[in-house]
Image (cartoon, coloured by chain):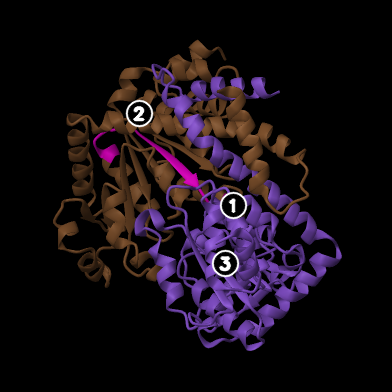
Chain colours: A purple, B brown
Amino acid sequence: MEISSLLKRLHQGDARAVARAISLVEDQGQSGPDIMAGLDPKRLETSLVVGITGPPGAGKSTLTASIVKALRNEKTRVGIIAVDPSSPLTGGALLGDRIRMMEHTLDPDVVVRSMATRGRLGGLCAAAGAAVRILAASGCRLVLIETVGIGQSEMDIATLADITMMVLAPGFGDDIQAMKAGILEVVDLLVVNKADQPGAQKLLLDLGREATSSGRVLQTVAREDQGIIRLLDAIFALEQQLRQDNTLQIRRQQARQREALDWTLELLKPFLRQQINSSPTANNDPGEIARQLAGRIIAEHG
Amino acid sequence: MEISSLLKRLHQGDARAVARAISLVEDQGQSGPDIMAGLDPKRLETSLVVGITGPPGAGKSTLTASIVKALRNEKTRVGIIAVDPSSPLTGGALLGDRIRMMEHTLDPDVVVRSMATRGRLGGLCAAAGAAVRILAASGCRLVLIETVGIGQSEMDIATLADITMMVLAPGFGDDIQAMKAGILEVVDLLVVNKADQPGAQKLLLDLGREATSSGRVLQTVAREDQGIIRLLDAIFALEQQLRQDNTLQIRRQQARQREALDWTLELLKPFLRQQINSSPTANNDPGEIARQLAGRIIAEHG
Protein backbone atom coordinates (compact mmCIF):
# COMPACT_ATOMS: atom_id res chain seq x y z
CA MET A 1 0.00 0.00 0.00
CA GLU A 2 1.27 3.47 -0.76
CA ILE A 3 1.86 5.77 2.16
CA SER A 4 -0.61 8.38 0.95
CA SER A 5 -3.33 5.75 0.73
CA LEU A 6 -2.35 4.32 4.12
CA LEU A 7 -2.51 7.80 5.66
CA LYS A 8 -5.91 8.45 4.11
CA ARG A 9 -7.38 5.23 5.51
CA LEU A 10 -5.69 5.85 8.85
CA HIS A 11 -7.36 9.24 9.14
CA GLN A 12 -10.69 7.61 8.24
CA GLY A 13 -10.21 5.43 11.33
CA ASP A 14 -9.50 2.14 9.54
CA ALA A 15 -8.17 -0.24 12.22
CA ARG A 16 -5.96 -2.23 9.85
CA ALA A 17 -4.36 0.93 8.49
CA VAL A 18 -3.71 2.06 12.07
CA ALA A 19 -2.06 -1.26 12.94
CA ARG A 20 0.01 -1.25 9.77
CA ALA A 21 1.19 2.33 10.32
CA ILE A 22 2.28 1.59 13.91
CA SER A 23 4.19 -1.49 12.76
CA LEU A 24 5.96 0.41 9.99
CA VAL A 25 7.05 3.11 12.43
CA GLU A 26 8.11 0.54 15.06
CA ASP A 27 10.18 -1.35 12.52
CA GLN A 28 12.00 1.87 11.66
CA GLY A 29 11.38 1.29 7.99
CA GLN A 30 11.83 3.87 5.24
CA SER A 31 8.20 4.93 5.45
CA GLY A 32 8.13 5.65 9.19
CA PRO A 33 9.13 9.32 8.93
CA ASP A 34 6.65 9.91 6.09
CA ILE A 35 3.82 8.42 8.14
CA MET A 36 4.64 10.51 11.20
CA ALA A 37 5.00 13.66 9.11
CA GLY A 38 1.63 13.00 7.46
CA LEU A 39 -0.45 12.84 10.64
CA ASP A 40 -3.11 15.53 11.01
CA PRO A 41 -1.66 18.01 13.53
CA LYS A 42 -5.11 19.23 14.52
CA ARG A 43 -6.18 15.77 15.67
CA LEU A 44 -2.92 15.39 17.61
CA GLU A 45 -3.61 18.72 19.27
CA THR A 46 -7.20 17.97 20.30
CA SER A 47 -6.64 14.42 21.57
CA LEU A 48 -5.88 13.68 25.19
CA VAL A 49 -3.45 11.00 26.38
CA VAL A 50 -4.13 9.43 29.78
CA GLY A 51 -1.57 7.14 31.42
CA ILE A 52 -2.96 4.48 33.75
CA THR A 53 -0.58 2.70 36.07
CA GLY A 54 -0.67 0.77 39.33
CA PRO A 55 0.22 -2.58 40.89
CA PRO A 56 -1.02 -5.92 39.54
CA GLY A 57 -4.43 -6.76 40.89
CA ALA A 58 -5.61 -3.20 41.54
CA GLY A 59 -8.12 -3.58 38.73
CA LYS A 60 -6.58 -1.46 35.97
CA SER A 61 -7.95 -3.59 33.15
CA THR A 62 -11.44 -3.61 34.62
CA LEU A 63 -11.25 0.14 35.15
CA THR A 64 -9.99 0.68 31.61
CA ALA A 65 -12.86 -1.43 30.25
CA SER A 66 -15.34 0.56 32.33
CA ILE A 67 -13.90 3.89 31.14
CA VAL A 68 -14.12 2.68 27.54
CA LYS A 69 -17.75 1.67 28.07
CA ALA A 70 -18.63 5.12 29.43
CA LEU A 71 -16.83 6.84 26.55
CA ARG A 72 -18.58 4.65 23.98
CA ASN A 73 -21.94 5.58 25.49
CA GLU A 74 -21.06 9.12 24.44
CA LYS A 75 -19.89 7.88 20.99
CA THR A 76 -16.33 8.92 21.82
CA ARG A 77 -13.66 7.04 19.86
CA VAL A 78 -10.93 5.73 22.14
CA GLY A 79 -7.50 4.19 21.73
CA ILE A 80 -5.73 1.90 24.20
CA ILE A 81 -2.01 1.21 24.34
CA ALA A 82 -1.50 -1.79 26.60
CA VAL A 83 2.10 -2.10 27.71
CA ASP A 84 2.98 -5.55 28.94
CA PRO A 85 5.94 -5.54 31.28
CA SER A 86 5.66 -9.23 32.00
CA SER A 87 6.61 -10.18 28.48
CA PRO A 88 9.95 -11.68 29.45
CA LEU A 89 7.75 -14.26 31.11
CA THR A 90 4.75 -14.51 28.86
CA GLY A 91 5.97 -13.49 25.46
CA GLY A 92 3.62 -10.54 25.49
CA ALA A 93 0.43 -12.55 25.62
CA LEU A 94 -0.78 -11.44 29.03
CA LEU A 95 -2.38 -8.09 28.38
CA GLY A 96 -3.29 -9.08 24.87
CA ASP A 97 -5.35 -11.92 26.28
CA ARG A 98 -7.12 -9.72 28.75
CA ILE A 99 -7.81 -7.03 26.21
CA ARG A 100 -9.26 -9.57 23.82
CA MET A 101 -11.71 -10.57 26.51
CA MET A 102 -13.08 -7.09 26.63
CA GLU A 103 -16.56 -6.52 25.37
CA HIS A 104 -15.48 -3.91 22.86
CA THR A 105 -13.48 -6.21 20.62
CA LEU A 106 -15.81 -5.78 17.66
CA ASP A 107 -16.30 -2.05 18.08
CA PRO A 108 -14.32 -0.27 15.31
CA ASP A 109 -14.05 2.85 17.46
CA VAL A 110 -12.11 1.08 20.21
CA VAL A 111 -8.57 0.68 18.90
CA VAL A 112 -6.26 -1.50 20.97
CA ARG A 113 -2.52 -1.81 20.54
CA SER A 114 -0.58 -4.21 22.71
CA MET A 115 3.12 -3.54 23.23
CA ALA A 116 5.61 -5.84 24.85
CA THR A 117 8.72 -4.66 26.60
CA ARG A 118 10.44 -7.93 25.65
CA GLY A 119 14.00 -7.32 24.71
CA ARG A 120 13.77 -3.58 24.85
CA LEU A 121 13.42 -1.59 27.96
CA GLY A 122 14.68 1.30 25.94
CA GLY A 123 12.82 2.02 22.78
CA LEU A 124 9.48 1.49 24.42
CA CYS A 125 8.83 5.14 25.24
CA ALA A 126 9.58 5.98 21.65
CA ALA A 127 7.41 3.25 20.18
CA ALA A 128 4.56 4.03 22.56
CA GLY A 129 4.81 7.73 21.76
CA ALA A 130 4.53 7.09 18.03
CA ALA A 131 1.59 4.72 18.55
CA VAL A 132 -0.19 7.33 20.69
CA ARG A 133 0.04 9.90 17.91
CA ILE A 134 -1.11 7.46 15.23
CA LEU A 135 -4.16 6.52 17.33
CA ALA A 136 -4.88 10.20 17.94
CA ALA A 137 -4.63 10.97 14.22
CA SER A 138 -7.05 8.12 13.49
CA GLY A 139 -9.68 10.08 15.41
CA CYS A 140 -9.32 8.89 19.00
CA ARG A 141 -10.39 11.72 21.30
CA LEU A 142 -8.80 9.84 24.20
CA VAL A 143 -5.81 7.54 24.14
CA LEU A 144 -5.27 5.46 27.28
CA ILE A 145 -1.83 4.01 28.03
CA GLU A 146 -2.21 1.11 30.44
CA THR A 147 0.89 -0.30 32.12
CA VAL A 148 1.08 -3.01 34.74
CA GLY A 149 3.64 -2.34 37.39
CA ILE A 150 5.05 0.18 39.76
CA GLY A 151 8.65 0.27 38.56
CA GLN A 152 10.51 3.19 37.09
CA SER A 153 9.99 2.00 33.52
CA GLU A 154 6.24 1.97 33.97
CA MET A 155 6.40 5.47 35.44
CA ASP A 156 8.46 6.62 32.46
CA ILE A 157 5.88 5.32 30.05
CA ALA A 158 3.08 6.84 32.06
CA THR A 159 4.74 10.23 31.93
CA LEU A 160 4.47 10.17 28.14
CA ALA A 161 0.84 10.91 28.85
CA ASP A 162 -0.78 14.32 29.18
CA ILE A 163 -2.48 13.19 32.38
CA THR A 164 -1.29 10.37 34.65
CA MET A 165 -3.45 8.29 36.91
CA MET A 166 -2.53 5.61 39.44
CA VAL A 167 -4.96 2.89 40.43
CA LEU A 168 -4.75 1.41 43.93
CA ALA A 169 -7.06 -0.93 45.79
CA PRO A 170 -7.36 -2.01 49.40
CA GLY A 171 -5.58 -5.17 50.45
CA PHE A 172 -2.03 -4.70 49.24
CA GLY A 173 1.06 -5.24 51.33
CA ASP A 174 3.46 -2.76 52.81
CA ASP A 175 5.24 -2.44 49.47
CA ILE A 176 2.28 -0.49 48.18
CA GLN A 177 1.11 1.07 51.42
CA ALA A 178 4.45 2.72 52.08
CA MET A 179 4.41 4.71 48.91
CA LYS A 180 0.94 6.16 49.23
CA ALA A 181 2.00 9.44 50.74
CA GLY A 182 4.14 10.41 47.77
CA ILE A 183 1.84 9.34 44.97
CA LEU A 184 0.23 12.70 44.28
CA GLU A 185 3.66 14.22 43.78
CA VAL A 186 4.20 12.09 40.69
CA VAL A 187 0.72 11.44 39.26
CA ASP A 188 -2.20 13.77 38.56
CA LEU A 189 -5.01 11.53 39.75
CA LEU A 190 -5.21 8.69 42.25
CA VAL A 191 -8.04 6.20 41.83
CA VAL A 192 -9.01 4.08 44.83
CA ASN A 193 -10.67 1.18 43.05
CA LYS A 194 -12.70 -1.55 44.78
CA ALA A 195 -13.91 1.27 47.01
CA ASP A 196 -16.73 -0.93 48.32
CA GLN A 197 -14.28 -3.36 49.93
CA PRO A 198 -13.22 -3.36 53.56
CA GLY A 199 -9.98 -1.44 53.84
CA ALA A 200 -10.89 1.23 51.30
CA GLN A 201 -11.76 3.73 54.03
CA LYS A 202 -8.46 3.04 55.79
CA LEU A 203 -6.61 3.57 52.52
CA LEU A 204 -8.35 6.94 52.09
CA LEU A 205 -7.61 7.89 55.71
CA ASP A 206 -3.96 6.96 55.22
CA LEU A 207 -3.77 9.24 52.22
CA GLY A 208 -4.68 12.12 54.47
CA ARG A 209 -7.33 14.80 54.36
CA GLU A 210 -5.27 17.15 52.22
CA ALA A 211 -5.02 14.58 49.45
CA THR A 212 -8.60 13.33 49.57
CA SER A 213 -10.06 16.84 49.60
CA SER A 214 -7.87 17.98 46.68
CA GLY A 215 -10.25 16.59 44.06
CA ARG A 216 -7.40 14.44 42.78
CA VAL A 217 -8.40 11.28 44.67
CA LEU A 218 -11.32 9.43 43.10
CA GLN A 219 -13.19 6.34 44.24
CA THR A 220 -14.45 3.69 41.85
CA VAL A 221 -15.92 0.21 41.82
CA ALA A 222 -14.92 -0.55 38.26
CA ARG A 223 -16.52 -3.98 38.21
CA GLU A 224 -19.90 -2.31 38.71
CA ASP A 225 -19.13 0.82 36.67
CA GLN A 226 -19.42 2.97 39.78
CA GLY A 227 -17.63 6.30 39.97
CA ILE A 228 -16.57 6.26 36.33
CA ILE A 229 -18.50 9.35 35.23
CA ARG A 230 -17.03 11.36 38.11
CA LEU A 231 -13.57 10.09 37.16
CA LEU A 232 -14.06 11.16 33.53
CA ASP A 233 -15.33 14.54 34.70
CA ALA A 234 -12.15 14.94 36.76
CA ILE A 235 -10.01 13.97 33.76
CA PHE A 236 -11.69 16.45 31.43
CA ALA A 237 -11.66 19.23 34.04
CA LEU A 238 -7.94 18.68 34.48
CA GLU A 239 -7.46 18.69 30.71
CA GLN A 240 -9.15 22.07 30.45
CA GLN A 241 -6.94 23.48 33.19
CA LEU A 242 -3.74 22.08 31.63
CA ARG A 243 -4.68 23.57 28.26
CA GLN A 244 -5.48 26.95 29.76
CA ASP A 245 -2.25 27.39 31.68
CA ASN A 246 -0.13 25.96 28.86
CA THR A 247 1.04 23.00 30.97
CA LEU A 248 -0.18 20.54 28.34
CA GLN A 249 2.08 22.03 25.71
CA ILE A 250 5.09 21.95 28.02
CA ARG A 251 4.40 18.31 28.99
CA ARG A 252 4.15 17.31 25.33
CA GLN A 253 7.38 19.09 24.47
CA GLN A 254 9.15 17.26 27.30
CA ALA A 255 7.63 13.93 26.29
CA ARG A 256 8.90 14.36 22.73
CA GLN A 257 12.40 15.19 23.90
CA ARG A 258 12.32 12.08 26.06
CA GLU A 259 11.11 10.01 23.12
CA ALA A 260 13.87 11.39 20.89
CA LEU A 261 16.47 10.49 23.53
CA ASP A 262 14.98 7.02 23.89
CA TRP A 263 15.02 6.44 20.11
CA THR A 264 18.59 7.72 19.87
CA LEU A 265 19.82 5.36 22.60
CA GLU A 266 18.00 2.49 20.91
CA LEU A 267 19.56 3.27 17.53
CA LEU A 268 23.02 3.56 19.06
CA LYS A 269 22.85 0.28 20.99
CA PRO A 270 23.92 -2.19 18.28
CA PHE A 271 26.85 0.06 17.38
CA LEU A 272 27.88 0.49 21.03
CA ARG A 273 27.51 -3.24 21.75
CA GLN A 274 29.84 -4.01 18.87
CA GLN A 275 32.40 -1.52 20.16
CA ILE A 276 32.17 -2.95 23.68
CA ASN A 277 32.41 -6.58 22.62
CA SER A 278 35.58 -5.84 20.70
CA SER A 279 37.16 -4.14 23.74
CA PRO A 280 39.71 -5.97 25.86
CA THR A 281 37.89 -7.25 28.96
CA ALA A 282 40.90 -7.99 31.10
CA ASN A 283 39.88 -5.84 34.02
CA ASN A 284 36.95 -5.98 36.45
CA ASP A 285 35.61 -2.60 35.52
CA PRO A 286 33.02 -2.31 32.76
CA GLY A 287 32.83 1.35 33.77
CA GLU A 288 36.32 1.95 32.42
CA ILE A 289 35.40 0.54 28.99
CA ALA A 290 32.32 2.75 29.03
CA ARG A 291 34.20 5.90 30.01
CA GLN A 292 36.67 5.45 27.19
CA LEU A 293 33.99 4.72 24.59
CA ALA A 294 31.65 7.55 25.65
CA GLY A 295 34.56 9.97 25.96
CA ARG A 296 35.71 9.18 22.43
CA ILE A 297 32.22 9.67 20.97
CA ILE A 298 31.65 12.99 22.73
CA ALA A 299 35.10 14.28 21.76
CA GLU A 300 34.69 13.32 18.11
CA HIS A 301 31.23 14.78 17.93
CA GLY A 302 31.94 18.00 19.77
CA MET B 1 41.48 8.54 52.62
CA GLU B 2 43.98 7.24 50.11
CA ILE B 3 42.76 4.61 47.70
CA SER B 4 45.32 2.05 48.80
CA SER B 5 44.21 2.41 52.41
CA LEU B 6 40.54 2.29 51.39
CA LEU B 7 41.17 -0.88 49.41
CA LYS B 8 42.99 -2.47 52.32
CA ARG B 9 40.15 -1.76 54.75
CA LEU B 10 37.61 -2.85 52.13
CA HIS B 11 39.30 -6.24 51.80
CA GLN B 12 39.33 -6.53 55.59
CA GLY B 13 35.55 -6.28 55.44
CA ASP B 14 35.19 -2.80 56.93
CA ALA B 15 31.59 -1.75 56.28
CA ARG B 16 32.37 1.97 56.06
CA ALA B 17 35.14 1.38 53.55
CA VAL B 18 32.74 -0.74 51.49
CA ALA B 19 30.10 2.00 51.53
CA ARG B 20 32.65 4.67 50.66
CA ALA B 21 34.07 2.64 47.77
CA ILE B 22 30.62 2.02 46.28
CA SER B 23 29.78 5.73 46.52
CA LEU B 24 33.03 6.74 44.86
CA VAL B 25 32.41 4.34 41.96
CA GLU B 26 28.76 5.42 41.65
CA ASP B 27 29.73 9.07 41.53
CA GLN B 28 32.12 8.31 38.69
CA GLY B 29 34.89 10.15 40.44
CA GLN B 30 38.56 9.96 39.56
CA SER B 31 39.19 7.11 41.97
CA GLY B 32 36.45 4.77 40.69
CA PRO B 33 38.63 2.97 38.13
CA ASP B 34 41.44 2.56 40.65
CA ILE B 35 39.08 1.02 43.19
CA MET B 36 37.63 -1.43 40.67
CA ALA B 37 41.08 -2.35 39.38
CA GLY B 38 42.28 -2.97 42.95
CA LEU B 39 39.64 -5.57 43.89
CA ASP B 40 40.96 -9.05 44.68
CA PRO B 41 40.12 -11.15 41.58
CA LYS B 42 40.13 -14.37 43.60
CA ARG B 43 37.33 -13.14 45.86
CA LEU B 44 35.34 -12.00 42.84
CA GLU B 45 35.81 -15.45 41.33
CA THR B 46 34.72 -17.42 44.38
CA SER B 47 31.71 -15.32 45.32
CA LEU B 48 28.23 -16.10 44.10
CA VAL B 49 25.64 -13.51 43.08
CA VAL B 50 21.98 -14.45 43.52
CA GLY B 51 19.23 -12.27 42.07
CA ILE B 52 15.90 -12.34 43.90
CA THR B 53 12.86 -10.91 42.19
CA GLY B 54 9.08 -11.23 42.34
CA PRO B 55 5.90 -9.19 42.80
CA PRO B 56 5.26 -6.98 45.83
CA GLY B 57 3.85 -8.96 48.72
CA ALA B 58 5.33 -12.35 47.78
CA GLY B 59 7.61 -12.15 50.79
CA LYS B 60 10.98 -11.39 49.21
CA SER B 61 12.24 -9.37 52.14
CA THR B 62 11.19 -11.98 54.66
CA LEU B 63 12.79 -14.68 52.52
CA THR B 64 15.97 -12.64 52.17
CA ALA B 65 16.10 -12.16 55.95
CA SER B 66 15.59 -15.88 56.47
CA ILE B 67 18.33 -16.77 53.97
CA VAL B 68 20.69 -14.35 55.69
CA LYS B 69 19.88 -15.93 59.05
CA ALA B 70 20.69 -19.41 57.75
CA LEU B 71 23.92 -18.22 56.18
CA ARG B 72 24.96 -16.46 59.38
CA ASN B 73 24.38 -19.67 61.32
CA GLU B 74 27.18 -21.07 59.14
CA LYS B 75 29.30 -17.94 59.70
CA THR B 76 29.01 -17.06 56.02
CA ARG B 77 29.46 -13.37 55.25
CA VAL B 78 26.71 -12.06 53.01
CA GLY B 79 26.02 -8.91 51.02
CA ILE B 80 22.62 -7.56 50.02
CA ILE B 81 21.93 -5.08 47.24
CA ALA B 82 18.37 -3.87 47.68
CA VAL B 83 17.07 -2.17 44.56
CA ASP B 84 14.11 0.06 45.20
CA PRO B 85 11.99 0.59 42.12
CA SER B 86 9.38 2.57 43.96
CA SER B 87 11.71 5.45 44.56
CA PRO B 88 9.83 7.86 42.28
CA LEU B 89 7.14 7.56 44.93
CA THR B 90 9.06 7.16 48.16
CA GLY B 91 12.40 8.79 47.52
CA GLY B 92 14.11 5.47 48.02
CA ALA B 93 13.09 4.97 51.60
CA LEU B 94 10.94 1.88 51.18
CA LEU B 95 13.43 -0.94 51.02
CA GLY B 96 15.85 0.94 53.20
CA ASP B 97 13.21 1.00 55.93
CA ARG B 98 12.50 -2.66 55.63
CA ILE B 99 16.14 -3.60 55.56
CA ARG B 100 16.77 -1.54 58.65
CA MET B 101 14.13 -3.56 60.43
CA MET B 102 16.04 -6.74 59.83
CA GLU B 103 17.58 -8.40 62.80
CA HIS B 104 21.05 -8.38 61.31
CA THR B 105 21.57 -4.65 61.39
CA LEU B 106 24.39 -4.80 63.88
CA ASP B 107 26.13 -7.83 62.36
CA PRO B 108 29.31 -6.59 60.58
CA ASP B 109 29.20 -9.61 58.26
CA VAL B 110 25.84 -8.64 56.78
CA VAL B 111 26.52 -5.77 54.40
CA VAL B 112 23.48 -4.01 52.99
CA ARG B 113 23.48 -1.50 50.16
CA SER B 114 20.25 0.16 49.14
CA MET B 115 19.98 1.50 45.60
CA ALA B 116 17.22 3.69 44.25
CA THR B 117 16.21 3.79 40.63
CA ARG B 118 15.14 7.40 41.05
CA GLY B 119 16.09 9.42 38.04
CA ARG B 120 18.00 6.68 36.38
CA LEU B 121 16.49 3.67 34.87
CA GLY B 122 19.67 3.34 32.92
CA GLY B 123 22.83 3.32 34.94
CA LEU B 124 21.36 1.04 37.56
CA CYS B 125 22.73 -2.18 36.10
CA ALA B 126 26.14 -0.60 35.98
CA ALA B 127 26.00 0.75 39.52
CA ALA B 128 24.60 -2.51 40.89
CA GLY B 129 27.29 -4.51 39.08
CA ALA B 130 30.05 -2.43 40.61
CA ALA B 131 28.49 -2.71 44.07
CA VAL B 132 28.23 -6.48 43.70
CA ARG B 133 31.94 -6.78 42.99
CA ILE B 134 32.90 -4.48 45.85
CA LEU B 135 30.79 -6.54 48.28
CA ALA B 136 32.33 -9.74 46.92
CA ALA B 137 35.85 -8.35 47.31
CA SER B 138 35.04 -7.39 50.91
CA GLY B 139 34.64 -11.09 51.62
CA CYS B 140 30.97 -11.83 50.95
CA ARG B 141 30.66 -15.43 49.83
CA LEU B 142 27.13 -14.66 48.66
CA VAL B 143 25.75 -11.40 47.33
CA LEU B 144 21.96 -11.18 47.08
CA ILE B 145 20.35 -8.66 44.73
CA GLU B 146 16.78 -8.05 45.82
CA THR B 147 14.44 -6.18 43.49
CA VAL B 148 10.77 -5.49 43.96
CA GLY B 149 8.75 -5.78 40.82
CA ILE B 150 8.10 -7.86 37.78
CA GLY B 151 8.94 -5.33 35.08
CA GLN B 152 11.66 -5.57 32.51
CA SER B 153 14.04 -3.35 34.46
CA GLU B 154 13.85 -5.64 37.46
CA MET B 155 14.53 -8.62 35.22
CA ASP B 156 17.54 -6.84 33.75
CA ILE B 157 18.98 -6.23 37.17
CA ALA B 158 18.29 -9.79 38.22
CA THR B 159 20.17 -11.09 35.20
CA LEU B 160 23.30 -9.40 36.46
CA ALA B 161 23.31 -12.27 38.91
CA ASP B 162 24.97 -15.64 38.49
CA ILE B 163 21.76 -17.33 39.61
CA THR B 164 18.27 -15.84 39.38
CA MET B 165 15.36 -16.71 41.59
CA MET B 166 11.74 -15.60 41.47
CA VAL B 167 9.56 -15.57 44.55
CA LEU B 168 5.83 -16.12 44.17
CA ALA B 169 3.10 -16.74 46.71
CA PRO B 170 -0.50 -17.89 46.53
CA GLY B 171 -3.19 -15.27 46.33
CA PHE B 172 -2.10 -13.04 43.49
CA GLY B 173 -4.33 -11.99 40.66
CA ASP B 174 -4.36 -13.07 37.04
CA ASP B 175 -1.49 -10.71 36.28
CA ILE B 176 0.84 -13.03 38.12
CA GLN B 177 -0.94 -16.30 37.47
CA ALA B 178 -0.75 -15.91 33.71
CA MET B 179 3.01 -15.72 33.65
CA LYS B 180 3.72 -18.78 35.74
CA ALA B 181 4.20 -21.13 32.83
CA GLY B 182 7.09 -19.21 31.36
CA ILE B 183 8.95 -18.38 34.54
CA LEU B 184 11.45 -21.23 34.43
CA GLU B 185 12.51 -20.10 30.97
CA VAL B 186 13.89 -16.88 32.39
CA VAL B 187 14.90 -17.68 35.98
CA ASP B 188 16.90 -20.53 37.45
CA LEU B 189 14.83 -21.15 40.55
CA LEU B 190 11.21 -20.52 41.43
CA VAL B 191 10.35 -20.20 45.10
CA VAL B 192 6.74 -20.73 46.14
CA ASN B 193 6.71 -18.84 49.41
CA LYS B 194 3.88 -18.96 51.98
CA ALA B 195 3.63 -22.62 51.00
CA ASP B 196 1.47 -23.31 54.05
CA GLN B 197 -1.31 -21.08 52.81
CA PRO B 198 -4.41 -22.22 50.95
CA GLY B 199 -3.76 -21.86 47.25
CA ALA B 200 -0.14 -22.98 47.37
CA GLN B 201 -1.02 -26.45 46.13
CA LYS B 202 -3.03 -25.00 43.26
CA LEU B 203 -0.10 -22.76 42.35
CA LEU B 204 2.19 -25.81 42.24
CA LEU B 205 -0.35 -27.78 40.21
CA ASP B 206 -0.64 -24.90 37.76
CA LEU B 207 3.11 -24.89 37.30
CA GLY B 208 2.87 -28.43 36.04
CA ARG B 209 4.55 -31.68 36.96
CA GLU B 210 7.51 -31.11 34.66
CA ALA B 211 8.41 -27.88 36.46
CA THR B 212 7.79 -29.09 40.01
CA SER B 213 9.78 -32.29 39.50
CA SER B 214 12.73 -30.45 37.91
CA GLY B 215 14.28 -29.57 41.26
CA ARG B 216 14.03 -25.92 40.30
CA VAL B 217 10.78 -25.22 42.15
CA LEU B 218 11.21 -24.83 45.91
CA GLN B 219 8.67 -24.32 48.67
CA THR B 220 9.28 -22.08 51.65
CA VAL B 221 7.50 -20.52 54.59
CA ALA B 222 9.99 -17.74 55.07
CA ARG B 223 8.24 -16.26 58.09
CA GLU B 224 8.92 -19.52 59.95
CA ASP B 225 12.29 -20.24 58.34
CA GLN B 226 10.89 -23.36 56.69
CA GLY B 227 12.45 -24.73 53.51
CA ILE B 228 15.41 -22.35 53.62
CA ILE B 229 18.12 -25.00 54.01
CA ARG B 230 16.73 -26.92 51.03
CA LEU B 231 16.66 -23.68 49.05
CA LEU B 232 20.30 -22.94 49.90
CA ASP B 233 21.24 -26.52 48.97
CA ALA B 234 19.58 -26.00 45.59
CA ILE B 235 21.43 -22.72 45.10
CA PHE B 236 24.84 -24.22 45.91
CA ALA B 237 24.18 -27.35 43.81
CA LEU B 238 23.31 -25.12 40.87
CA GLU B 239 26.43 -23.05 41.48
CA GLN B 240 28.59 -26.17 41.29
CA GLN B 241 26.96 -27.20 38.05
CA LEU B 242 27.32 -23.74 36.49
CA ARG B 243 30.99 -23.64 37.44
CA GLN B 244 31.64 -27.10 36.04
CA ASP B 245 30.11 -26.54 32.63
CA ASN B 246 31.55 -23.03 32.34
CA THR B 247 28.12 -21.38 32.26
CA LEU B 248 29.03 -19.14 35.17
CA GLN B 249 31.94 -17.62 33.27
CA ILE B 250 29.78 -17.00 30.20
CA ARG B 251 27.04 -15.38 32.29
CA ARG B 252 29.55 -13.08 33.97
CA GLN B 253 31.06 -12.09 30.66
CA GLN B 254 27.60 -11.22 29.34
CA ALA B 255 26.72 -9.33 32.50
CA ARG B 256 29.86 -7.21 32.18
CA GLN B 257 29.15 -6.39 28.57
CA ARG B 258 25.66 -5.35 29.58
CA GLU B 259 27.05 -3.22 32.38
CA ALA B 260 29.51 -1.56 30.01
CA LEU B 261 26.67 -0.78 27.59
CA ASP B 262 24.55 0.57 30.43
CA TRP B 263 27.38 2.81 31.69
CA THR B 264 28.07 4.03 28.15
CA LEU B 265 24.44 4.99 27.57
CA GLU B 266 24.37 6.74 30.92
CA LEU B 267 27.52 8.72 30.14
CA LEU B 268 26.19 9.70 26.71
CA LYS B 269 22.78 10.87 27.95
CA PRO B 270 23.60 14.46 28.99
CA PHE B 271 25.43 15.00 25.71
CA LEU B 272 22.57 13.50 23.65
CA ARG B 273 19.94 15.47 25.59
CA GLN B 274 21.75 18.66 24.81
CA GLN B 275 21.91 17.76 21.11
CA ILE B 276 18.20 16.91 21.06
CA ASN B 277 17.07 20.02 22.91
CA SER B 278 18.91 22.20 20.42
CA SER B 279 17.23 20.44 17.46
CA PRO B 280 14.32 22.06 15.68
CA THR B 281 11.12 20.43 16.95
CA ALA B 282 8.77 21.53 14.21
CA ASN B 283 7.59 18.05 13.25
CA ASN B 284 5.67 15.37 15.14
CA ASP B 285 8.37 12.77 14.84
CA PRO B 286 10.96 12.51 17.60
CA GLY B 287 12.17 9.43 15.72
CA GLU B 288 13.43 11.61 12.88
CA ILE B 289 15.53 13.73 15.24
CA ALA B 290 16.91 10.51 16.74
CA ARG B 291 17.74 8.94 13.39
CA GLN B 292 19.68 11.99 12.29
CA LEU B 293 21.58 12.27 15.56
CA ALA B 294 22.41 8.55 15.86
CA GLY B 295 23.32 8.35 12.18
CA ARG B 296 25.73 11.27 12.54
CA ILE B 297 27.44 9.73 15.59
CA ILE B 298 27.85 6.31 14.00
CA ALA B 299 29.15 7.81 10.75
CA GLU B 300 31.70 10.01 12.52
CA HIS B 301 32.88 7.22 14.73
CA GLY B 302 33.09 4.57 12.01
Dot 1: what SS?
A: loop
The amino acid type, in three-letter code, at marker 1 is Ser
Give the residue type at disc 3.
Val
Residue A10 in picture, x, y percent from top left: 62, 68
> Which residue in the protein does label 1 denote?
A31
Residue B122 visible in the displayed image: no
- First along the sequence among labels 1 and 3: 3
Q: Which mark is residue B253?
A: 2
Q: Is residue B87 among the parts visible in the rendering?
A: yes
- Judging by the rendered image, the residue that carries numbered circle 3 is A18
Q: Looking at the picture, does residue B157 appear above or below residue B14? A: below
Residue at x-position 58% and y-position 42% = B120
In this picture, is A299 found above or below B213?
A: above
Q: Nearer the viewer, residue B132 or A252?
A: A252
Q: Chain of mark 2?
A: B
Q: Which residues are magenta?
A: B71-87
Q: Does residue B189 sit above or below B294 in this rendering? A: below
Q: Position of residue A107 (x, y in %)?
A: 53, 82
